[in-house]
Structures are given as structure tokens and as C-alpha cells.
């Protein structure tokens, strides 16, 4: 089963398995709610506010069953506050920002020139 390893509290995540022709799927979630159809090889989850969400799936095809599960670590949302001073044409301008409830993940940090 593939699922996000990290997500924001009250956000969404997707979990999926490799499709098996003719199989039926039964999904369950602790720490969130399934959004939409839970009978396919993937499911969208509306996450709750606990520290983790656990996603489980059972795939059934003919007389065979396979079960899988995984956990998603949930993190507090962060808020970005920008500080933009008044500027003038042809003069350098410094824009600063602060994070409330943590910091941006390294993959979301940016550098402007």
C-alpha cells in the first residue's frame, strides 16, 4: 500500500494499492474519514486532528484476500506572516516572513533574488 507518510492535520491524503483485475477493496481509516468511493484501488482521506492516521485495506479476488495498512504522521498547520515594508522604484526591498506553528518543510522553502 502506498500512502503519504506526512500530512497536515485537517488536510487530505491519498492511499492506493496496485490494482488487481476483478478485485474488490475494503478500506478503513482511524484518525480520518474516507471521502468518496472506498471500493476502488485508491481512496482519498479527510484527515483529523490527532497525531496519526492509520489506513487499512483488504483486497479480495476469487478465493484470495490480501491485507495492508500504513500510518500517516499528522502535523500542525503553519501560518506564514509576511512583512513587506514600503518600497521605492530602483531601490532594494527586503521581504521577510515568519512561521507560526513551526516552519516550512525544506522542500517548500524558497529563495528569491
Image: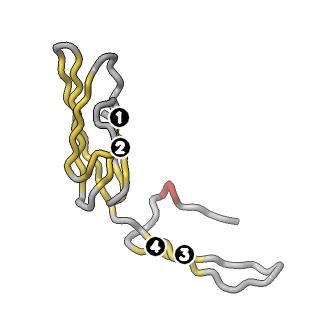
- Judged left or right of residue 25, residue 44 is right
Label 2 sits on a secondary structure element that is: strand
Residue 75 to residue 5: above or below = below
**How far is the residue under mark 3 from the one under mark 4?**
7 Å
Task: Tell me where residue 94 appears, x and y as whole percent.
Answer: 66, 78
Q: Earlier in the sequence, mark 1 or mark 3?
A: 1
In depth, the one of 53 and 100 nearer the eye is 53
Q: Which residue is mark 2?
A: 44
Quarter of the rendering occupied by the C terminus: bottom right
**How far is the residue under mark 1 from the one under mark 3?**
37 Å
Q: Which residue is mark 3?
A: 97
Asked whether the residues under the numbered discs 3 and 4 touch, taking CB atoms below 8 Å apart as contact, a structural biologist would say: yes
Mark 1 surroundings within 10 Å by alpha-carbon count, few (fewer than 14), some (14 through 19), many (20 or more): many
Task: Tell me where residue 32 appears, x and y as whole percent.
Answer: 25, 52
| Residue most extreme to the bottom | 86
**Front of the two marks 1 and 3:** 1
**How far is the residue under mark 2 from the one under mark 3?**
32 Å
Q: Which mark is residue 111?
A: none
Residue 17 to residue 83: above or below = above
- Judged left or right of residue 39, residue 99 is right
Label 3 sits on a secondary structure element that is: strand
Q: Earlier in the sequence, mark 4 or mark 1?
A: 1
Residue at x 19% of width, y 49% of height: 30
Asked whether the residues under the numbered discs 2 and 1 touch, taking CB atoms below 8 Å apart as contact, a structural biologist would say: yes
Q: Which mark is residue 42?
A: 1
Q: Which residue is mark 4?
A: 99
Residue at x 70% of width, y 86% of height: 86
Mark 3 surroundings within 10 Å by alpha-carbon count, few (fewer than 14), some (14 through 19), many (20 or more): few
Label 4 sits on a secondary structure element that is: strand
Residue 31 to residue 91: above or below = above
In depth, the one of 106 and 78 nearer the eye is 78
Q: Earlier in the sequence, mark 2 or mark 4?
A: 2
Amino acid at each position: 500500500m502506498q500512502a503519504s507518510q506526512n500530512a497536515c492535520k485537517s488536510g487530505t491524503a491519498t492511499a492506493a494499492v496496485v490494482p488487481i483485475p476483478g478485485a474488490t477493496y475494503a478500506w478503513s481509516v482511524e484518525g480520518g474519514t474516507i471521502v468518496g468511493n472506498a471500493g476502488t484501488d485508491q481512496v482519498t482521506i479527510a484527515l483529523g486532528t490527532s497525531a496519526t492516521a492509520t489506513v487499512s485495506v483488504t483486497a479480495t479476488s476469487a478465493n484470495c484476500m490480501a491485507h495492508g495498512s500504513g500510518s500517516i504522521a499528522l502535523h500542525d498547520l503553519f501560518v506564514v506572516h509576511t512583512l513587506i515594508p514600503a518600497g521605492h522604484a530602483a531601490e532594494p526591498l527586503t521581504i521577510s516572513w515568519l512561521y507560526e506553528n513551526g516552519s516550512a518543510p525544506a522542500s517548500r522553502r524558497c529563495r528569491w533574488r
